[in-house]
Amino acid sequence: MNRAEKAGLQLQAVAVLRMLKQTRTYDELAAVTGLPAGDLNRYVNGHVLPGTDRAREVVDGVGREALASELRARVTVDEEGYVDNSSVVFDQSFLDLVAPVAVETLEFDRPDVVLTAATDGITLGAAMASHFDARIAYAKKSKETAVEEFIESRHRLASGIELTYYLPATAIDEGETVLVVDDLIRSGETQELLLDIAEQAGAEVTGVFTLIAVGREGLDRARAFTEAPVGALTTFEE
Ligand SMILES: O=P(O)(O)OC[C@H]1O[C@H](OP(=O)(O)OP(=O)(O)O)[C@H](O)[C@@H]1O
Ligand SMILES: Nc1ncnc2[nH]cnc12
């Protein structure tokens, strides 16, 4: 780990601790993290940075669980199992916190491009791309004006309606690496289209990540299309 990566990890741990501290006393934070309350006070106030091992423990161990439960507390699920996650996808600061934790715990390699689907995947995609210093690309259900060439992927849904996503052909170069992300996966049809677009571009997929999986079908479907890691921050049972 070089110095910049070490500093990045230390600052991620501080961001996670600050988020957890918002609803906890230092003693409660000590109970969650297993770290002394006095040290936590110094980290949260920015007087001292946690060492690399402690920072990794916070980001890997505490971070993922804490962010998943924060996410679950924010979303609502209606009686048909549809999820309203607008309070998460509209909150760029929260997504900026999720990105490094997801990357550390699911062990995604740095991609050249983070690929997502408009609309609701865009803010998570931006957070992931910013974390990796990678480009973002989002496929849309309509063609952008003035773009001459598109990669398109079409799929007939169970209802018979056809779904097509379009990506400007210049968004991904052949041989580049791509991390595919979205806010939510349910049937996996959207991920299948994104993975097909990545394949048409001649890209190598480094992983698939979603904030929420509703049931297992979508993740299993994505796994059938790539050997790269596929994961969700949290899964809701159907
Ligand atoms: O796994 P699937 O069954 O394909 O469902 C997941 C997709 O559905 C939602 O997008 P939606 O199509 O509602 O578009 P939006 O982001 O513009 O709301 C969500 O943001 C995912 O992209
Ligand atoms: N918001 C949502 N909740 C559950 N399933 C979905 N499929 C597509 N969008 C969804």
Image (cartoon, grey):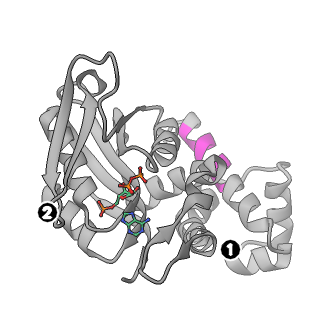
- Name the residue type under label 1: Thr
Is 204 on the left or on the right of 184, as rendered? left
- Residue 203 higher or lower than 53, as above or below: above
Is 10 on the left or on the right of 44, as rendered? left
Q: Which residue is mark 2?
A: 224
Residue 232 falls in image quadrant: bottom left
> Mark 2 near mark 1, Cβ–Cβ under 8 Å?
no
Q: Nearer the viewer, residue 143 or 49?
A: 143
Q: Which residue is mark 1?
A: 33
Magenta stretch: give its range: 5-13
Residue 109 falls in image quadrant: top left
Q: Which mark is residue 143?
A: none
Q: In percent of the image, x 42 and y 79: which residue is there?
A: 81
Say what secondary structure mark 2 lies in.
Answer: helix
Q: Nearer the viewer, residue 144 or 217?
A: 144
Q: Dominant secondary structure of the magenta stretch?
A: helix
In reply to whether residue 12 is colored magenta, the answer given is: yes
**Residue 167: image location, x then y, percent:** 27, 32
**Residue 89: image location, x then y, percent:** 55, 54
- Sequence-wise first label, 2 or 1: 1
Mark in front: 2 vs 1: 2
- Residue 36 higher or lower than 153, as above or below: below
Residue 51 falls in image quadrant: bottom right
Q: How many marks?
A: 2
